[in-house]
Image (cartoon, rainbow, N blue to C red):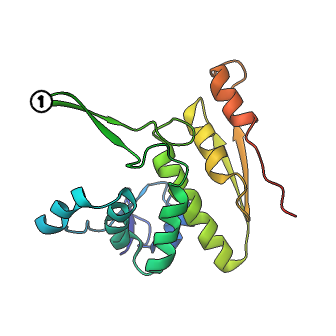
Amino acid sequence: MLYKSTRGTAERVSFQEVLFSGLAPDGGLYIPECLPKYDVNCISRFAQMSYEEVAFTILKPFIGGFFSDQELQGMLVDAYLEFRNLDKCKIVSLSENHKVLELFHGPTFAFKDFAMQMIAQMFHQSLKKIRKSITIIVATSGDTGAAAVHAFSNLEFVNLYVLFPKGRISEIQRRQMTTERLLMSK
């Protein structure tokens, strides 16, 4: 699958180039040239699959051959290992026709854990292959920083810096960003 810029002037690129580039050179966001089609039978099987299996089925067409099936499955297991609910996101019935999807069962209690944990695993796997390191700078006013700090902590080849406005975030968010336990390698 190739990706194009929302501004339309940048060249089409692969998943790997999107992963490492952020914005397109023309300042646009990268989007897939086309969306994969999932048939009704595939979608109906989602109810019997684990979160990781559903995520694999959905992500695989977007990633193509950049990660092997085994690598992608391993990243999905590692990404969602610390979630407190076996289903990762729980659907709670409030009444017959009203349900709520709980997205706070990740390690930092933020919905952003769903994406950030997986993105961190993708960076980790990619950088391990090419034996290069990167520096990521995050500016946040809340949950994004805590999710990023937790997801990228202890990953080889990634240096993460988080900027946040002093006195303008909650105390719990500040603590999540500044007290993450880092494992020291031997």
- Residue 186 is left or right of residue 3, and the answer is right
Percent across and percent down for residue 62 are 37, 69
Crowd rating for badge 1 (residues with CA inside 10 Å; few <14, some 14–19, many 20+): few
Please give the name of the residue rendered at 37% of the width and 74% of the height, measured from the top-left corner: 2
Pick the quarter of the image with the N terminus: bottom left
Residue toward you, 48 or 61: 48
Percent across and percent down for residue 153 are 70, 51
The relative height of residue 175 versus residue 23 in the rendered view (above or below) is above
Q: Quadrant of residue 47?
A: bottom left
Q: Quadrant of residue 42?
A: bottom left
**Which residue is identified by label 1?**
96
- Residue 98 is left or right of residue 15, and the answer is left
Q: What amino acid type should be assigned to the residue bearing mark 1? A: Glu
Please give the name of the residue rendered at 55% of the width and 65% of the height, measured from the top-left corner: 122
Element class at badge 1: loop
Quick one: which residue is furthest to the right in this view?
186
> Can see residue 37?
yes
Percent across and percent down for residue 32 are 34, 65
Residue toward you, 166 or 147: 147
